[in-house]
Amino acid sequence: MSDDNEQGFEQDGLEWVQADEKDDAFQPGSGSGQAVVPASDSLPERVYLLPIHNRPFFPAQVQPLVINRERWEETIRRVGNTPHHMVGLAFVGETGVEELSHEDFPEVGTAVKVHKLQGEDAQLQFIAQGMRRFRIQRWLSKKPPYLVEVSYPREPVDAEDDETRAYAMSLINGIKELLPINPLYGEELKHYLNRFSPHEPGPLTDFAAAITSAKGPELQDVLATLPVIERMQKVLPLLRKEIDVAQLQTEISEQVNAQMQERQREFFLREQLKVIQRELGISKDDRENDVDTFRARLNDKVVPERVMERIDDELDKLSVLETGSPEYGTTRHYLDWLTSLPWGVTSDDQLDLAHARKVLDRDHDGLKDVKERIVEFLAEGTFKGDVGGSILLLVGPPGVGKTSVGRSIAEALGRQFYRFSVGGMRDEAEIKGHRRTYVGAMPGKLVQALKEVEVENPVIMLDEVDKMGQSFQGDPASALLEVLDPEQNIDFLDHYLDVRLDLSKVLFVCTANTLDSLPPALLDRMEQIRLSGYIAEEKMAIAKHHLWPKLLKRDHIPKKRINLTDAALRQVIEGYAREAGVRQLEKQLHRIVRKAAVKLLENEQQTIKVSVKNLEDFLGAPTFRKEKVMKGEGVVTGLAWTAMGGATLSVEAGKVHALDRGFKLTGQLGEVMKESANIAYSYVLGHLGDYGAEPDFFDSAFVHLHVPEGATPKDGPSAGVTMTTALLSLARHEPIDRPLAMTGELTLTGQVLPVGGIREKVIAARRSEIFEVILPDANRRDYEELPDYLREGVTVHFASHYRDVAKVVFG
């Protein structure tokens, strides 16, 4: 760089400063106070170009610019070597200037004078003073540093024209309107505005465009517009938009400030109120508020003396503790529970048998024996004066309505109802609570139930008591012993409360699918009521009176739009939902409603009729086909009990070959059924002659005994009579020629022992259309207790010895 150039730039490390600030420093307030436009003859014909992005630079602007040192240092050096120190700025877009060619530069740019150049690390900074528009005439260098020949076009304007003066005054007024409402424009800018007057509309227009936040392409269009009138017409909308945005920002800011001021005002007033109350002695701190709250809760309660002593002790402790201490929070939580319990608060029982029958009949079809058992239970409570302290156990397969029966009991009594499931529960603290020494300790579920229902005598349902688990954390089934024992629960002790709680007024209703997994000690404390499942007629009534109306109401579908015929409903029951309960039946009916809803939406005038003919369009092929009772030599139908209800079980006996004696069992039988099969084989082997068969039949016969559906595990002591009859039928070469089912266990001496699940087995026989049944004589009373509608049309033979069975089967 030349040292003898008086107006050159000197380099000192990374900082470049102007050598003659007196000549080149820009002083905006000097002269006449008007914009000074240099004459054309003082502007260079050749200028170096610098690309800028974001927005173009206007002739009326003066502002700092920062450029990349590595890329444009050579251009700045050459500008510094020129006598005029001017460079051309051209807008190349809003995204950046990384990859450029000369075609990216616009035709019109702004010539600026460079002042106070400084270098810092990888950047160069200088103040650019906008001078004049230029138009590129010819490219002298199409690669950096870019050099072009330019011309400075005249801006045709008649400053004294009325239209021009009107536009100019509009621009000045717009700028003055913008300045007070936009904090970005300060006092210095107001002084700078004094340089412009309506007599010089060109610089005024450029200045107005420069202070807007319009996008780069819009501003470049303004820069390239030479006629001043046309340029002002483009700038005025941009300026008006800027004013509108600034006004909106001001309104938002005022709203925010108003809200903040209101909150601050409330805060100060509240603080002043606290000070005034404290001075007058009428204020209370948090501790006093808590103590008053807890004492107020006990006003209408009859708290036992020992419990009240504990509450008083804890309240005294609370009053001396610091509110920020951990023990304060623990004590407060403990008192919150103690004072929230319904000490001495009970609801009046509605011991009206007629009302109870009405509620049970309204909510449930069938279950006649269960309803009578519940009415008897309530009648007993009428003489006692209450039904508290009783524990009912509803046992039955899934979907028969155990939970809803418990809810109906609560409604019949007029009591509060609370249900929680203990299925899968492995921690005894869920029943008896945690010790208060643990972080996050809570009372047990029973205390939580009393707090929620707010009375001491609700109906609490313990669902799925047969599915409780055990773990290292304890045995919840054993923890229930104290809860469900009428002799102990009068003084139930929750570990968290650590005071005695009276649960004797609570009516506990438990539900279970089976009794096998329940501890005998727990089972002994409960009164069992069995819900054995429904026959087809009962399911029809339940579906018509409860399930179908509930589904239509839930989906807001008018009853007239969907018609389900009785024949189709019976087909749903027999072909798709044969389980003991009605949950699967509800699912199938829901499928019908869903598919019908689609058709109703496709044709709003349509009415859907679901009949046997089109049922498969809604549900597909039936899951269950009509079962034919298996017949043949050595084939006998038995009756079995499962957790899902009763079932028929075919037993087949066949002679494989006559080479040697042998006996084979298949059908995935459990240990008990294997023992029954061996007893049956031994009994038949020793008594063939007594029952009219060849005494030596099994001496040379390899016999195979099979119970079909080998994929299903089967076990239980009720198939001995059935297996014996199958072997005897094989030995006599005499098939059973009529639908006949039997159940009973056999001893080696031929005694027929009683079995369980008589109701379920009779229902299973009726479901398979078998109306002749052989039962153990010891189960005669169980059969006679069945409802009349189950016994109707069924012929029953009672057997105490196998001779009675053989007499019925073979005559």
Image (spheres, rainbow, N blue to C red):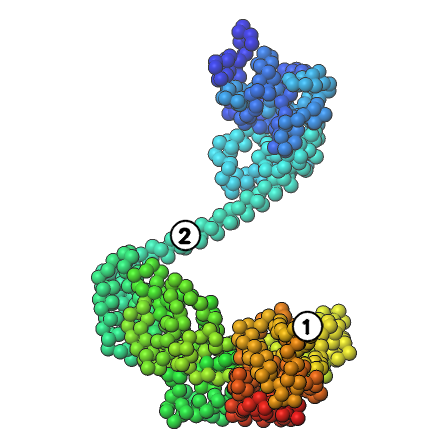
Please state which of residues 428 and 354 is positioned toward the viewer in this rendering.
Answer: 428
- For badge 1, the amino acid type reads Leu
Label 1 belongs to which residue? 659
Q: Secondary structure at mark 1?
A: loop
Q: Residue at x 41, y 63 (%)?
A: 471
Say whether residue 401 is visible. Answer: no
Please state which of residues 587 and 595 is positioned toward the viewer in this rendering.
Answer: 587
Q: CA distance from mark 2 to mark 1?
A: 107 Å
Quarter holding the N terminus? top right
Query: What percent of the width, then of the height, locates residue 511?
Result: 48, 77
Q: Which of the 4 image quarters holds residue 441?
A: bottom left
Taking 552 as reference, is 801 left or right?
left
Q: Residue at x 42, y 66 (%)?
A: 470
Q: Which of the 4 image quarters holds residue 273?
A: bottom left
Quarter holding the C terminus? bottom right
Q: Is residue 439 above or below residue 49?
A: below
Q: Residue at x 28, y 72 (%)?
A: 499
Q: Is residue 411 above or below residue 255?
A: below
Q: Label for residue 261?
A: 2
Near mark 1 (Cα within 10 A), the count class, few <14, some 14-19 or many ≥20, is: few
Query: What percent of the width, then of the height, locates residue 35?
Result: 58, 25
Taking 99 as reference, is 269 left or right?
left
Taking 392 as reference, is 568 left or right?
right
Please state which of residues 278 and 404 is positioned toward the viewer in this rendering.
Answer: 404
- For badge 2, the amino acid type reads Gln
